[in-house]
Image (cartoon, helix red, strand yellow):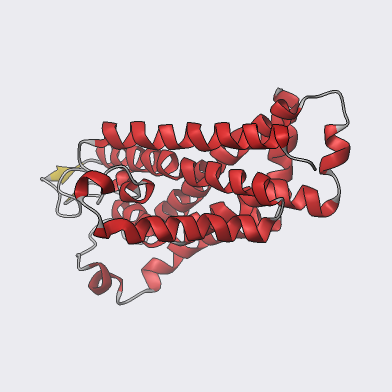
Amino acid sequence: MLTLIALEFRKLLKARSARLALLVCFGLPLLWPLAPRLEALFQVDLTSGWQLPAVSLGVLVQFLLPLFIAVTCAELIGAEVSGGTLAPLLLRPVNRTRVLLGKLLVALLYPALLIAATVAGSLLAGLFLGLGPFTGGTGLGPGYFAGVGALTPGDALGQVLRGALLAAVMLMPVAALALLFGVLYLGTAPAALATLATLSVLRLLVVFPESVQRLLLTSHLDLYARQGGVLQGLVLLLIYTAAFGWLAVYAFERRDV
């Protein structure tokens, strides 16, 4: 199984969509020190480089990161179908469930790679503002950007890592959903479009009562920045991830490829 996962991980890193996404996630934050209207756009006075990860996640997480994840995770199936390599793979002495589970585990790790690249680029850009002690907040901890007093670099790093971990978990259901659509459509473009369309439709359901909204996947795409009460959202997102993953395995077992 570990060999299969390593193989799928190498395929992921060779994909042009994955490399482009990692480049954008790392490179985009490097523009912040050159953006004179950044503070006006976010309506906050940036006083420390520790605040840039929150800015980067705020820009990327609502559209670009789901887009990157939808395309690349759908490509885990679609690229093999279009390249004619999926059928020969299934003829080897390994069952379909193991093949799909390998792809699923790699897909679930992909959001963490994008978040890590985003945070790394943000902290590199943050050197221009300084990464020392400061008074304020990182945007990912108590008081958001205003903070609750002085922060040491260690405390700031802790808040950034907490936010990054929550962001990675928050995007896992998107990866599992894209893989599910990849199995259903056996193509990258339709699977990615179906994933993004599903997220868009879910966002439109804000017209429903709050009791319904709390159950929607898209209602928890701000989990990384929440100050408390994250447990319910985390559990719900993990349930979505497990459900989409199980459906992908179930569909793959019965799909004629």
User: Is 56 placed above or below 163 here?
Assistant: below
Q: Nearer the viewer, residue 200 or 113?
A: 200
Q: Quadrant of residue 108?
A: top right
Asked if residue 84 lies left or right of residue 95, the reply is right
Q: What is the residue that sits farthest to the left in this orientation? A: 148
Q: Quadrant of residue 47?
A: bottom left
At 63% across and 52% down in the image, what residue appears?
72
Q: What is the residue that sits farthest to the bottom in this orientation? A: 36
Quadrant where the C terminus sits is top right
Q: Nearer the viewer, residue 82 or 120?
A: 82
Asked if residue 100 lies left or right of residue 93, the reply is left
At 75% across and 52% down in the image, what residue appears?
79
User: Is 207 placed above or below 143 here?
Assistant: below
User: Can residue 146 be seen in this snapshot?
Assistant: yes
Asked if residue 201 lies left or right of residue 220, the reply is right
At 31% across and 49% down in the image, what residue appears?
219
Q: So how many labels did they put on this image? A: 0
Residue 23 at x, y = what percent?
A: 58, 59
Q: Quadrant of residue 60?
A: bottom left
At 27% across and 58% down in the image, what residue appears?
206
Quadrant where the N terminus sits is top right
Residue 67 at x, y = what percent?
A: 52, 59
Residue 178 at x, y = what percent?
A: 57, 48
User: Can residue 22 be seen in this snapshot?
Assistant: no
Residue 122 at x, y = what percent?
A: 41, 55
User: Is 36 placed above or below 84 here?
Assistant: below
